[in-house]
Amino acid sequence: MSYLREVIAKTEEKNPSQPEFIQAVEEVMLSLESTVDRHPEYVAAGIYDRIVEPDRQVIFRVPWVDDSGKVQVNRGFRVQFNNAIGPYKGGLRFHPSVNLGIIKFLGFEQVFKNSLTTLPMGGGKGGSDFDPKGKSNSEVMRFCQAFMRELFRHIGPETDVPAGDIGVGGREIGYLYGYYKLIRNEHTGVLTGKGLDYGGSLIRPEATGYGAVYFAAEMLATRNESLAGKTAAISGSGNVAQYSNEKVIQMGGKNISFSDSSGTIIDPEGINLEKLEYVMDLKNNRRDRIKEYAEKYPESRYYEGKSVWEVIKEQSIKVDIAFPSATQNEINEDQALALVKNGCFCVSEGANMPTTPKGVEVFLDHDVLYGPGKAANAGGVSVSGLEMSQNSMKLLWEKEEVDNRLQIIMKNIHAECQGAAEAYGFKRCNYICGSNIAGFLKVARAMLAYGVI
């Protein structure tokens, strides 16, 4: 058994019933095999063993009162995974599926993603099994305040800076930050994704979606292709999906799909800016289901209970580019095969680990341009890092400046992934190994410099 296989086995033994975390560790560790012989100092210092173990894992009770006066109890989490290169940085997810294993997988991925941005940010993640869907604004506010009553002990602008994620948008960030400000009696950059009126950054809501499309454009350029005239499929219907759609349109392509937990819509004519504006109102303001899109636009069709990728498989829908932007493991092996069969030659992940290991193998075996989430969706945390910088300087940069910085960061991430893949014996287009190696090396060098801590 190789050294890194032993690391994986020990991690699995220590973390039973956490399949998402084990999946993430295995994917990263196996891609680092070529670094072991070249860097014996990392083995001697136990870097590989240490990097899979979080610095700390916090689990806490979150009691709150619903609108009927009944006490509800949820569970809160914050996993501070690694702060070798900067304060812990990673989102908060509010969703019934949240458990410790999912938060650890997300925090582990965040370590390498944040390293790739070149910004001084460590990796962490948090959240709760609270479901904001169907809750009133007052109930969401009371939950967020109860959640922050415990979380505030563990965060700070130079310690740990959370942001949003699934179920945590501008409304939730406002409630969380407002209560933190009340408790601490200070304005600090302790949360990112804030509103513009109280310390947020322009382009932050757009950043993950824009970044995923910028990364796709960089991959396409390696084959002298562009998004112009291409048909894309986007899953999800939150911020990432919405702004991926917007940027695809701006770059000359069209998106034909959106989805949520209830089903998928396919619009063969493409979701133009007018239709996108309707989706934004539907999801961001009215907080209703995506099936209403099909009622508004009869040229589209709604598929109850099915994912975008299942619909593409069943209906043999042709797409050139896929942007999985919903959740982890949403594309399986059969769906990946169907995408390839239907003409997909580029995948840029807007979500974290949205493709299963078997699905990834399909993409690599068929020479698909495959941008893994830790590289392709790093735009969101990149602009979060830029928000932290603006907060520190008490400045607000213009939209164009932030967007230009985002484009430069995504271009540099692409180059870093290509360079690391080539330097360690992989194809330049192997963005999985390239992103993992490039992200790991920076963190490993910092950990080595600190000694055994």
Image (cartoon, rainbow, N blue to C red):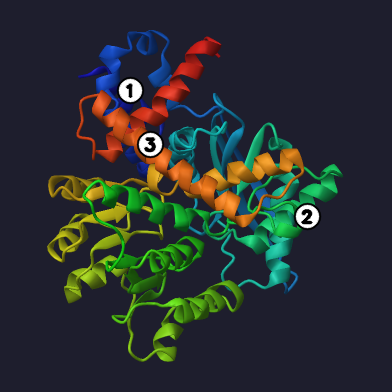
Three-letter code, disc 3? Pro
Q: The residue tagged with tag 2: helix, strand or loop?
A: helix
Query: What residue do we see at 64% from left, 48% from top?
Result: 192
The Cα–Cα distance between marks 1 and 3, rounded to whole angstroms, is 15 Å
Q: Pointer 3: what residue?
A: 16
Q: Pointer 1: what residue?
A: 7
Q: Pointer 2: what residue?
A: 178
**Observer-nearest of 225 and 308:** 225
Say which quadrant the C terminus sits in.
top right
Query: What residue do we see at 69% from left, 59% from top?
Result: 143
Query: What residue do we see at 44% from left, 78% from top?
Result: 290
Mark 2 or mark 3, earlier in chain: 3
Is label 1 or label 2 in front? 2
Q: Residues within 10 Å of mark 1 (few under 14, many from 20)?
A: some
Mark 1 or mark 3, earlier in chain: 1
The Cα–Cα distance between marks 1 and 2, rounded to whole angstroms, is 42 Å
> Can see residue 231?
yes
> Can see residue 70?
no
Three-letter code, disc 2? Gly
Residue 112 marker: none
Vertical order, 141 against 57 (above or below): below
Tell me residue 324's x, y (percent). Answer: 35, 59
